[in-house]
Image (tube, rainbow, N blue to C red):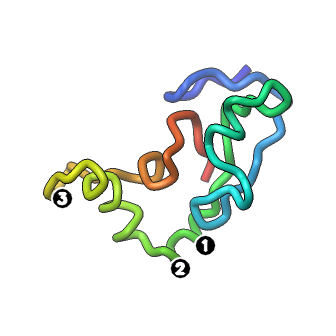
Amino acid sequence: TVHLPHGPVPTPVFMPVGTKGTLKGLTPMDVTGSNALNNQIILANTYHLALQPGTDLVRDVGTAIRGEVVGKGDEGGLHEFMGWDRNILT
């Protein structure tokens, strides 16, 4: 088991891939709510995220969703961009 900030991840583990911040064809609830999947971690590729949608959008989207003004140190980040409250490996 690997202990990470968003909870423990038993190993070995299958990690779905969210290349551009999204799991194709699945919602976060599909991945966490299924007994077959119930993933505690997903993989996101930082290179692809930097190209598209871009680091500024990923940083700012969480606060924009909450209707807040984006300020220094108040960024939303990848978890809010993806709507994912568990671990992300980048």
- Give the quarter of the image for residue 24: bottom right
Separation (CA) of disc 3 from disc 1:
23 Å
Q: Which residue is denoted by mark 2 in the rendering? A: 51
- Give the quarter of the image for residue 33: top right
Q: Which residue is denoted by mark 1 in the rendering? A: 48
Classify 35 as above or below 37. Answer: above
Q: Residue at x 80, y 33 (%)?
A: 37
Going by the numbered disc 1, the residue's amino acid type is His
Q: Of helix, strand and loop, which one carries label 3?
A: loop
In the picture as drawn, the residue positioned furthest to the bottom comes out as 51
Separation (CA) of disc 1 from disc 2:
5 Å
Q: Locate residue 16, reporting x and y percent.
A: 76, 48
- Give the quarter of the image for residue 25: bottom right
Q: Locate residue 43, reporting x and y percent.
A: 68, 50
Label 1 CA crowd tier, 10 Å (few <14, some 14–19, many 20+): some
| Disc sitting over residue 70 in the figure | 3
